[in-house]
């Protein structure tokens, strides 16, 4: 009898794994987010009959209609600040946050950032449970990862988040600029199942610390919306930086100045200058006292690479800055050509006066 009791105690203890404890720790801070959105809906007139449509072609119309959507979020402070994805609340006219236990709150948008696909919300109250932020620069491929959220609206059925477990499959995954101007860079890849509705929810480690914000999945087919074991999360260190700006100013300031005036290098110009290449950006003017001037850049220099990316026109430089989520104070590494030699210069992005 005593041996049986000891065995049962051992089983009970073994069930309290690190994953179980992590889920118990962070679950109260996970939120369901239900929104009413204004979306463009396309529809046709007619009878949807091929024979009728042949003789009387249907016209396509657009209208703005109210539709329901859902996603996830995570409380990051006791006074009700919540991180979620921008695409979860985009064009929302109403945002309702539900916490574990079923209590609902109307949320206020503090700030949004389309580029990183992040939004900061606020609900009224205090002493809310909140998640601990981890360090996404300290991840090991193969370590456990847990995704929590509101897949397919299931949070609203049982008034608690759904949890799935997997591993960190890869880090520093760069997708560049994708639809609607969003830039997904340095993403965390996980095989923890992430499904529609998980967007904006936390990806946590075995300590229950948030290491990422779940954002999108690879489905493998346009006909499938479910997880195939490839999901991606915004690293929490990036989210922390963005959230601090949103909390302080309500927006992310990406304005910058370099003090450079440039023009694309043409084949004729390259031949005239007797250059060994015909792709690059030539510096036409350097503003006195600018960061470019302080970096030692000169009129006539040819920029051929920026942060190890080839450039052929001024928009290529801006693309590097945008996709790197760089702003004033950050630095660019420029490979230039001057007087028959390649050189490397560091250019700090300055503030706009």
Image (cartoon, rainbow, N blue to C red):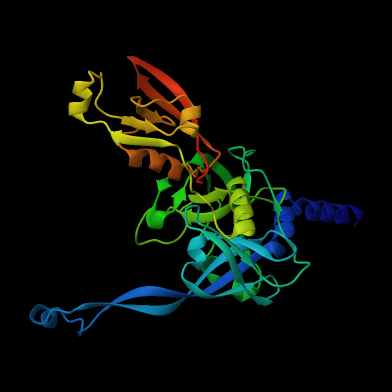
Residue 321, compared with residue 180, is above or below; it is above
Residue at the front extreme? Answer: 288
At which x and y percent is residue 205?
A: 66, 48
Foreground of the two, 3 or 89: 89
- Residue 147 showing in the rendered view: no
Q: Residue at position x 45%, y 60% from top?
A: 226
At which x and y percent is residue 311?
A: 34, 33
Residue at the top extreme? Answer: 340
Horizontally, is 182 left or right of 98 in the view? left
Question: Which quadrant would residue 315 be assigned to in this image?
Answer: top left
Q: Residue at position x 22%, y 31% from top?
A: 266
Q: Quadrant of the N terminus?
A: bottom right
Q: Residue at position x 25%, y 19% from top?
A: 275
Residue at the left extreme? Answer: 55
Horizontally, is 3 left or right of 154 in the view? right
- Residue 92 showing in the rendered view: yes
Q: How many marks?
A: 0
At which x and y percent is residue 82?
A: 64, 63
Residue at the right extreme? Answer: 2
At which x and y percent is residue 98?
A: 64, 73
Foreground of the two, 142 or 186: 186
């Amino acid at each position: 009898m005593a041996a049986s009791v000891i065995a049962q105690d051992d089983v009970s203890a073994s069930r309290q794994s690190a994953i179980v404890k992590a889920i118990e720790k962070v679950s109260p801070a996970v939120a369901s987010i239900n929104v009413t959105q204004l979306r463009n809906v396309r529809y046709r007139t007619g009878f949807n009959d091929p024979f009728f449509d042949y003789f009387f072609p249907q016209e396509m119309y657009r209208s703005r209609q109210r539709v329901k959507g859902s996603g996830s979020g995570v409380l990051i402070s006791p006074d009700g600040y919540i991180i979620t994805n921008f695409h979860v609340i985009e064009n929302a006219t109403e945002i309702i946050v539900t916490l574990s236990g079923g209590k609902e709150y109307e949320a206020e948008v503090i700030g949004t950032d389309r580029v990183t696909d992040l939004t900061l919300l606020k609900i009224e109250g205090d002493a809310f449970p909140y998640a601990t932020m981890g360090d996404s620069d300290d991840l090991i491929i193969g370590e456990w990862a847990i995704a929590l959220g509101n897949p397919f609206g299931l949070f609203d059925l049982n008034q608690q988040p759904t949890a799935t477990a997997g591993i960190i499959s890869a880090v520093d995954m760069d997708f560049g600029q994708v639809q609607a101007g969003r830039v997904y860079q340095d993403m965390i890849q996980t095989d923890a199942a992430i499904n529609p509705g998980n967007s904006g929810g936390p990806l946590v480690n075995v300590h229950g610390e948030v290491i990422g914000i779940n954002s999108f999945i690879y489905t493998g087919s346009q006909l499938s919306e479910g997880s195939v074991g490839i999901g991606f999360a915004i690293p929490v260190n990036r989210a922390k930086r963005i959230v601090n700006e949103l909390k302080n100013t309500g927006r992310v300031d990406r304005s910058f100045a370099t003090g450079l005036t440039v023009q694309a290098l043409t084949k004729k110009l390259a031949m005239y200058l007797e250059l060994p290449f015909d792709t690059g950006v030539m510096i036409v003017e350097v503003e006195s006292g600018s960061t470019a001037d302080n970096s030692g850049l000169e009129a006539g220099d040819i920029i051929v690479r920026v942060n190890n990316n080839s450039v052929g026109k001024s928009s290529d430089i801006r693309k590097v800055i945008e996709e790197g989520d760089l702003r004033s104070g950050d630095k660019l590494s420029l490979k230039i050509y001057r007087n028959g030699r390649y050189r490397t210069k560091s250019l700090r992005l300055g503030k706009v006066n």
